[in-house]
Image (spheres, grey):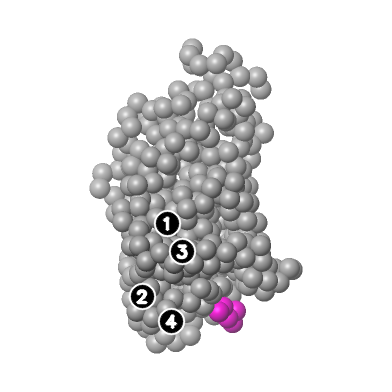
Amino acid sequence: MSDSLTFDPFDAAQTQHMWDRMREFRDRAPVARIGGGFVYVSRYADVQTVLRDQESFSNGGGMRPTGVEIPLHDASIGELVPPVHPPVRRLALTAAHGGGIVERLRPEARRVSEDLLTELEAQGGGDLIAGLSLPLTNRVIGALLGVDRDTCDRLAGWSEQIMMSTLTVTNETERGVGYEGAFPEFTAFLDSLIDERSADVAVDADAAEREADTITRIMRSGFESARLEPRVIRMILLNLVLGGTATTRDFLGNLLWVLLEDASLYEELHADRNLISRALDESLRHDPPVLYLIRTCTRETELAGTTIAKGERVIAGLASANRDERVYDEPDQFRLDRVDPAQHMSFGYGPHFCVGSAMAKMEAEEAMSALLDHFSPGTLRLDPQCTVEHMPLPYMLGPVRLSVRVGADRKYKHGFGVMPE
């Protein structure tokens, strides 16, 4: 293998701009050692194998550089291993899906989307990330937690600060170690919510039976029939807030970017709303919010003719698998006419499939429906000065901002008139 066929998985400047290199890996070295004890897996079938076989490829080590140890209360659910992972995952599913919560929140997602788009129109434009995808995801999460709108906006601010920091990679910032050290206001807020709900449940036995908010549902479910430690509850809430915010904001941001760059796609969706679901899946395939997952090999294993040693870190290339020519025709093209395409890998695969996938798709469906209802083709355009800048996390893909203007393109006769350049 050529020395040039490698990359640093913790350098966003490389990982977010390596589509051509992914193709090289798939063609020349589908299971490749890239240095530092890492093995990159780039083909769809092999990525499936890695994500399905948790006995050989463990979550241990998570998405961090080798040697970074993370306590349970600072971990992501995707970094946990049995016996801790199954009960925590069940609690997260209870929080994100219990009691039909996704469909119960659908009207709220639509209402919030319409309000935000009305405000954007009144202003003549703005940033679709700060003005739509970020507040939408946080207000839905806020409804899940049972907090008011002002608190939702605070959550949005904390979420952006955390995702722009080094915490999710190294578990520390200049300010301190772990969430408590680096973002004490955020953890103190979540702890206060947990204390408040705990007091309510203790005083009112009926509160434990109500599906009022996600914290109550978690407490009701318990932790393997034992008392659920507050810091574990906080860890689940951290995952819901940060995971729900970051991946969904990027999911929506990537889709909006494509639709505003290609007017024909917007027109097609505007004419046929039945294509929205297909557009969401195609966006997730073409521009996945999560570029890769990392596993640790627990025993000597052969994959696609290559022996992987115990202890080696295996990078499952979700983005590369999503563009595997062996699985998808014209994989680099964003197409709405794919017929029964293979399931994309953007929500993972196997026992660690994303617990928030249904919530993310629901939010995106409502945001896109509201957007298409609100803006006719040509009345919402990218600002001419808008350039691509991605969030700095190396394993994620999504625009930092998406500046738009409201007004009619010259080629359209309806709308608000000619937009000034």
Q: Secondary structure at mark 4?
A: strand
Three-letter code, disc 1: Asp
Residue that badge 4 annotates: 297
Q: Is residue 259 visible?
A: no
* Side of 118 where 179 appears, left or right: right
Q: Secondary structure at mark 1?
A: loop
- x, y percent for residue 134: 55, 46
Q: What are the residue bounds of the magenta stretch?
A: 67-71
Measure how far apart labels 2 and 3 are at the Cα level: 27 Å
Kindly report which numbered mark, 2 or 1, lies closer to the viewer in this rendering. 1
The residue that label 1 is drawn on is: 213
> Does 68 appear in magenta?
yes
Q: Which residue is mark 3?
A: 200
From the image, tell me which residue sits under label 2. 86
In percent of the image, x 35 and y 52: which residue is there?
101
| Kind of element beneath mark 3 | helix
User: Mark 1 to mark 4: distance in Å?
Assistant: 38 Å
- Which image quadrant is residue 395 in? bottom right
Which residue shows up at 55% across the image and 79% down it?
A: 71
Q: Is residue 8 above or below residue 55?
A: above
* Residue found farthest to the left: 340
Tell us which disc is closer to us: 2 or 3: 3
Counting other residues with Cα less than 10 Å from the Cα at mark 1, is it few (<14), some (14-19), or many (20 or more)?
some
Q: Earlier in the sequence, mark 1 or mark 4?
A: 1
**What residue appears at the point 51 percent right and 58 percent down from the top-left corner?**
241
